Amino acid sequence: MNQPFAPPDEIDGARVLRWAWSGNEPFGQVPGADSPDIFGLAIATYNDAQFYRFSCDRNWDCIQDGLYDSIDEAISQLPDQYRHVDAVWVSMSH
């Protein structure tokens, strides 16, 4: 599955603005027991004022999220555990 697997328009009710897909190798894992692999990253918003970075499994199910003041902040503060594969961010076309 090397080709990007685009997310749905919304994840957990938030409108997806940008996304990245890792391909065959995950970006990394969520720390802790039963850590699922993270294949999708999405920047989304509920209100266009704050932005969430969703860390998702192969099916775009959200495993972890973080809240940020800007899209750039959400992208630049990607944790080390999600840097096993370089994220290439794509703008969502709505």
Image (cartoon, rainbow, N blue to C red):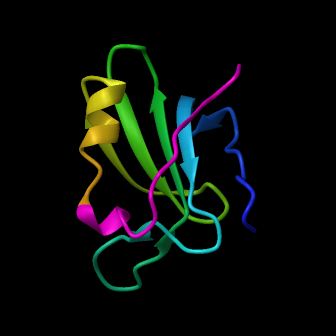
* Residue positioned 67% across, 61% down in the render: 59
* Residue positioned 62% across, 54% down in the render: 60
* Residue positioned 36% across, 63% down in the render: 82
Nearest the viewer among 46 and 73 is: 73
Q: Is residue 56 above or below residue 20?
A: below
Nearest the viewer among 38 and 4 is: 4
Q: Quadrant of the C terminus?
A: top right
* Residue positioned 58% across, 57% down in the render: 61
Residue 77 quadrant: top left
Query: Residue 30 in the image: x percent, y percent?
Result: 35, 70
Residue 86 quadrant: bottom left
Q: Quadrant of the N terminus?
A: bottom right
Decide if residue 12 is in sight here: no
Query: Residue 31 in the image: x percent, y percent?
Result: 29, 75
Instruction: Give the left or right position of residue 76, taking residue 17 as reference.
Output: left
Q: Which SS type dominates the magenta stretch? A: loop
The magenta stretch spans residue 45: no
**Which residues make up the magenta segment?**
80-94
